[in-house]
Image (cartoon, rainbow, N blue to C red):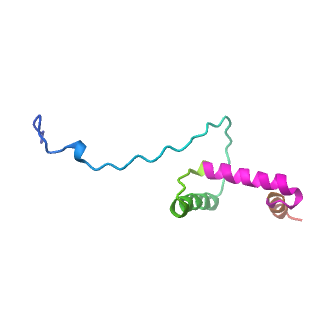
Amino acid sequence: MFRPQAGADWFDPGAAPRRPAPPPTPRQKHSAKITVYVSDEELLALEHARLDLRASHGLAVDRGRVVREAVAVILADLAAHGEESVLVRRLRQDSGP
């Protein structure tokens, strides 16, 4: 087994190139948790959206953040448009005649 001698300068960690640390992202502490079950296709679509946000828009967010933002958008639409909101229309469509 190879053991470097004390004082050997075969590796200088100070000489290794370093990338700048990414800026810290603001984290919000959440006080409640829910569990939501999704299909494999829905999970894949969510992951694709997360990757697209990163690749195309420079937004590095986790799936939870995407879901929270989507919920906020759909609830704001419900509050603003009521019966004509996207949520009401989709739920009526899914529930059938």
Residue 84 placement (x, y as % from top left): 86, 61
Q: Nearer the viewer, residue 84 or 44?
A: 84
**Residue 56 locus on image (x, y percent):** 54, 64
Q: Nearer the viewer, residue 34 or 21?
A: 21
* Residue 37 seen from this side: no
Q: Is residue 67 magenta?
A: yes
Does residue 40 sit above or below 26 in this rendering? below
In percent of width and height, residue 82 lies at 87, 56
Residue 9 figure quarter: top left
Residue numbers of the magenta segment: 65-86
* Residue 22 in the figure: left or right of residue 64: left
Indicate whether 7 appears above or below 97: above
The N terminus appears in which quarter of the rendering?
top left
* Residue drawn at point x = 11 percent, y = 34 percent: 6
Q: Main secondary structure of the magenta part?
A: helix
* Image position of 21 (left or right of 93): left
Residue 55, horizontal then vertical, whole percent: 51, 62
Looking at the image, is 30 positioned above or below residue 58?
above
